[in-house]
Image: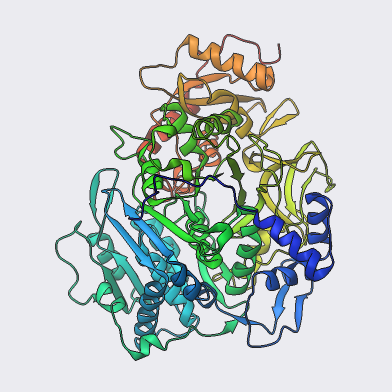
Amino acid sequence: MNSATTSVDLTTPVPQMRLYRNWLKEIRGLEFATYEDLHHWSVDDLEGFWRSIWEWDRVQSPTPVTDVLGGDAMPDARWFDGATVNYARHVFGHVDAAEEAGQPAIIAQDERGRNETIGWRELRSRAASLALDLRARGIAPGDRVAAYLPNIPAAVIGLLACASVGAVWTLCSPDMGINAVLDRWRQTQPKALIAVDGVFYAGKTLDRRATLAEIRAQLPCIESLYLVSTDCAESVATDAIDFAAVIARDDEAVAGFEPEWLPFDHPLWILYSSGTTGLPKAIVHGHGGVILATAAGRLHFDLGPSYEENTLGDRFHWNSASGWVMWNIQVGGLLSGTTICLFDGSPSGTRTDPDWTRLWDFAGRAGVTWFGAGAAFFANCRKAGVEIAQIDGAERIRALGSTGSPLPPDVQRWGTAQFATLGRPDIWWCNVSGGTEIAAAFMAGNPELPDTPGRLQCRHLGAAVEAWNERGEPIVDEVGELVCTKPFPSMPLYFWGDEDGSRYRGSYFSEWPGIWRHGDWLTVHEDGSCTISGRSDATINRHGVRMGTAEIYAAVEQLPRIADTMIIDVEDADGDSRLLMFVVPSEGEQVDAETQDAVAAAIRTSLSPRFVPDLLIAAPGIPRTLSGKKQELPIKRLFAGWPVAKVINVEASSTPEVLPWYVERAQAWRSHEPSQARLRTERTS
């Protein structure tokens, strides 16, 4: 692995946002005094803005664009009619320049410390080899190719190969159970499968041969199995195709291979919603929409080519399981010509003896300059007392990214203080919020704007995002529904199998026709920064006053005695409600009277006495989705008496071991509502 050098240049590059603004002034004659002015233009003149992104990012099409935006009514807007593009072709447009500068495409490491570095030319060759083999086995444009792979280079190669021939990529992480995988792939009917025979995670070897056999038995549509062999399984299916042998091909056909030109809206991949309360939505995104959204997104992520002088040697890492949309965002760094750094495994090692420095160690050795992770990762590092200054090479990191859940302000300030000791007192935080639905961000960062701990610095260029009240009116400095009032290029083309579009429309456009309702509580502040307060369907409403759960977590999870929490508002038959908080105490602590008093004081001080819980319940863990989000709504429904089978999907949970405890607790709650152990406080005092 290439490691950070002993002499580190701490110079901050010229922000991509500034370079873009300079380009607009020089090429288009457009000048904007503030970011807010730039954002207003980007949503008022959608055609002009997205055409500028096309040109700024040098997107290529051999066919002319007849219309940038055909019809602006969601969800039927059409983008760049006439254009032909290809995701993989755009990635490989960086090969020659990156190779000349000696910059790798991928730096990878697994949990056991094994490393692999892949150059740009080698990446293109491996993807071409696989693409040719897929085509030879009958894979045609529009056919689905499934992947059962962790965050390893083989997954990147598979995506680029499928994109090259117009196949539709659909990936499930090997940490998903068999039922969760089948719930997804039964909908999309893949024709080929690329899979590992086992994985190593959190110190354990996990053999996946039985799962693969069951997948093939349940999905006869799979005609070809490409096997990525590991040392986690001994024997394999005799009819499997050796993935390593396929991508090692080196002949004239590979050297001369070119990705196919495809219509702008040709399907690129299928992502899936969490499936916590029903069959996962199979969300289809197109080549062109993802290319454009990523091009605009790199202005907010401040990602430039690793081979250009301004961003020479930049290396982008976002810790993610392969089944989370942030894996797609991470791979999207290649579209910018940026080296991506993949870590496969648990970021903290074993569950019994966690070490929250492991991911930082990887970043230091890999020379990472842009480090992203879920908000919970940073919170755990703070609680564990991680000292980033002790990590060799960490001083090269110039940007930190957070998503998945709101990042508490005190956690962000902790991280800033850590990097100040490394000589980076101005470390930039790029907190982002968007989702699987758009494979992009609605709110993001901008290194030219002031630091805003606990907030997102700005609304994304080209995203007409507003906070609306219940009357459908935009509001400022108040919590409202997050809506997007105009089309965005990477919004879904459709849901797979949703022939009449009714499920798609019902998911996002049922509240206000033609307006995208995202399902989050949003505050747009006067200065343009934004705050996400949690899911709007999991909001706490106490006597007419609403509060997002994220604000409650920010208030209590800074307490040293608390490791994790989840809060739900459970209504009773009389129309009253009880506010229940599940608490995972820190090691050596317990949920006692002192904990209750500390929680009550924190919430009273930070928020309001209205939101002090009625009951604290010691819990063995907090249920989370595969992407790390707290499963508030399913647990709330469980306590409200919904059938377990309709509420709990073990396969869609990253913490299935704690779910039986919640089922038992909910049953006990409904049979005999506990009255003891109330917090010794009046909520409204």
Q: Which residue lies furthest to the left in this view?
A: 234
Q: Would residue 197 be found to the left or right of residue 531 on screen?
A: left
Q: Nearer the viewer, residue 665 or 442?
A: 442
Rendered location of residue 186, percent (x, y): 42, 68
Q: Please identify the quadrant where the N terminus is shown.
A: bottom left
Name the colouring of the figure. rainbow
- Position of residue 657 relative to residue 437, above or below, is above
Q: Would residue 69 be found to the left or right of residue 202 on screen?
A: right
Can residue 338 be seen here? The reply is yes
Q: Which residue lies furthest to the front in this view?
A: 7
Rendered location of residue 225, percent (x, y): 29, 74
Rendered location of residue 202, percent (x, y): 29, 43
Q: Residue at image x 49%, y 83%? A: 259
- Position of residue 165 relative to residue 178, above or below, is below
Q: Nearer the viewer, residue 529 or 265?
A: 529
Q: Please identify the quadrant where the C terminus is shown.
A: top right
Q: Would residue 560 be found to the left or right of residue 534 on screen?
A: left
Can residue 148 be seen here? The reply is no
